[in-house]
Image (cartoon, rainbow, N blue to C red):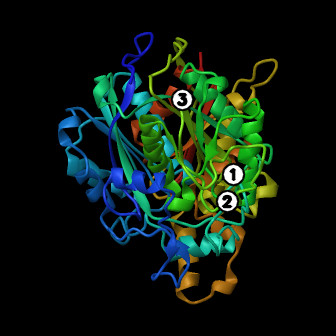
Amino acid sequence: MTPGGDGGVPAIGITDIAIASAFGGDAQHTWEEVRRGNSAVHPSSRFGGVLMAEVDDGKMIDALLAGLDERGVPPGTGIALGTSVAPGQVPPGRSPYDLLPAAVEAFGLRGPRASFATGCVAGAHALCRAVDVIRSGRAPAMLVAGVEMPDRPTLEAFRGWRATDDAPMSPYSRSAGTNLGGGGAVLVLTADPAAERVIAYVGGYGLASDAAHVTAPAADGEGLARAMAAALHDAGRSPAEVDYVNGHGTGTRANDQAELNAMGGLFARPGPPLSSLKPQIGHTLGASPVLEAALTAYAVRDQWLPPTINVDPGGDPDWDIVPGVSRPARLDVALTNSLAFGGMNCSIVLGRSPGAHPASPARRVRFARVARVPDQDAARGLVPRRFAHRLDDLALRAVAAAVLARQAVEEPAGGVDPRRIGLVFATSTGPARSRAAFEATLGEGRDDTFSPVATVNGAVSVVAGYISLSLRIQGPIAVIGASAADATVLEYASGFLRTGRADVVLVVHADEGMPATGQALFAL
């Protein structure tokens, strides 16, 4: 590994990894099983034989932290957590966001902390946040955690959306649906580590939003292509230098095709090898970006391409999806991609060297007046009619607050490029009522009342997606677990502006039963 960063920016290395997967054992064991092309997806005894990758440990965070070497976690280390729902990991009646204080207390962390619930990119947002914290010098190291334990409501929601496969999933091939999985990972990211400690370097990241559909990715993959291009720019790399792409690869037709279209939009043919780890470890939702970044880091370390299993050997001749069997390869630069409901895309660069992070522009931030939406009546007149009937109370007020914040934006003569507008949605409760209502129908055996529109409101990333669709926001978007008084939210949003990732960022806070607020931030 090559030490040293560029231009005064610290190099960021992954120096330790802990994994909890359905393969059992430690992190190295999971990687060896992946290299062998094995799968931990099997018929579930808990869920009537449904194909799933199950993890038995109900205290995943504790187990993961126990798998780390405390000597590699210096004083002042912070933590960023990504999870979608993580049922079973928190006591009844408490929020998934409560996982973070437990982890902080268990490991004695004193640095910055944040939790993200942006669906299947939650773990990626946690990793990106850790990169920003280390680059700014606010912590010498960060733990990046992703955890997920699917339950019956999660499974039934995916079934209702016709997103599961009754057979072993087959990304970029048969593409008939996904197999869910439980699991998690923790990465230790360290500033300027000794080269011998580095598993792989984190070179940079890119974020982009589709603003096309609340659940499906944009068919042309344009948002993901922008995220990959932004990540490579952030790492000082070019598309021609990419040796491997760990795809999101959920096995659904819409996702797989959008990813392949994104690849075609960025890379000259034949393009780098692309594979999906999910047929082996399951789709671990919010944890998947961290778990898959861990395995991609091992791929970089060992110079070994992990396979896409369960695919038709004939496959798509246009792309090398590493069908069936892993193989050695030169692997200096890798991308790992994540997509989520709400049209969110994230791409992260890993490599054998740190890359050359470009200097950030010197930009100041101006804050507009905070707008307030007290209740549903105040919200209804602000929300676009095409969405109003689909929204629950939380989403209704959040979208209305975003509309008011957007109205405060001073438009230049040519308008603001939607690709340069970002969004940070903060909530400490998420759509708890929508989730509870769906769980109640399952508890009463009323599976036939399933509504894809109503059920999707239980995913907190969807709230941000409706804001994005309503206002055509195509820049960086994240959902952060925080109260309205948490200074982390504005500091996080300001970072998008100061680092040149956006020119305008809308900050929206909404919790159930409380007034929603919206505020616009501008780069000067």
Residue 447 coordinates in the image, percent (x, y): 64, 85
Q: Nearer the viewer, residue 506 or 260?
A: 260
Labelled disc at residue 333: 3
Q: Nearer the viewer, residue 151 or 290?
A: 290
Residue 312 coordinates in the image, percent (x, y): 71, 60
Q: Which of pointers 2 and 1 indicates the residue nearer the eye?
A: 2
- Callout 1 crowding tier (Cα within 10 Å): few <14, some 14–19, many ≥20: many
Marks 2/3 in contact by CB < 8 Å: the verdict is: no
Labelled disc at residue 311: 2
Q: Secondary structure at mark 2?
A: loop
Q: Amino acid at mark 3?
A: Val
- Callout 2 crowding tier (Cα within 10 Å): few <14, some 14–19, many ≥20: many
Q: Amino acid at mark 1?
A: Tyr
Between the C-alphas of marks 2 and 1, the distance is 35 Å
Marks 1/3 in contact by CB < 8 Å: the verdict is: no
Marks 2/1 in contact by CB < 8 Å: the verdict is: no
Q: Amino acid at mark 2?
A: Val
User: How many numbered circles are shown?
Assistant: 3
Between the C-alphas of marks 1 and 3, the distance is 35 Å
Tell whether 257 sits left or right of 82: right
Q: Secondary structure at mark 1?
A: helix
Q: Quadrant of the C terminus?
A: top right
Mark 1 highlights which residue? 466
Labelled disc at residue 410: none
Q: Is residue 442 above or below residue 85?
A: below
Q: Quadrant of the N terminus?
A: top left
Between the C-alphas of marks 2 and 3, the distance is 25 Å
Q: Could you tell which of marks 2 and 1 lies nearer the N-terminus? A: 2
Q: Which of pointers 1 and 3 indicates the residue nearer the eye?
A: 3
Extreme-bottom residue of the structure: 445
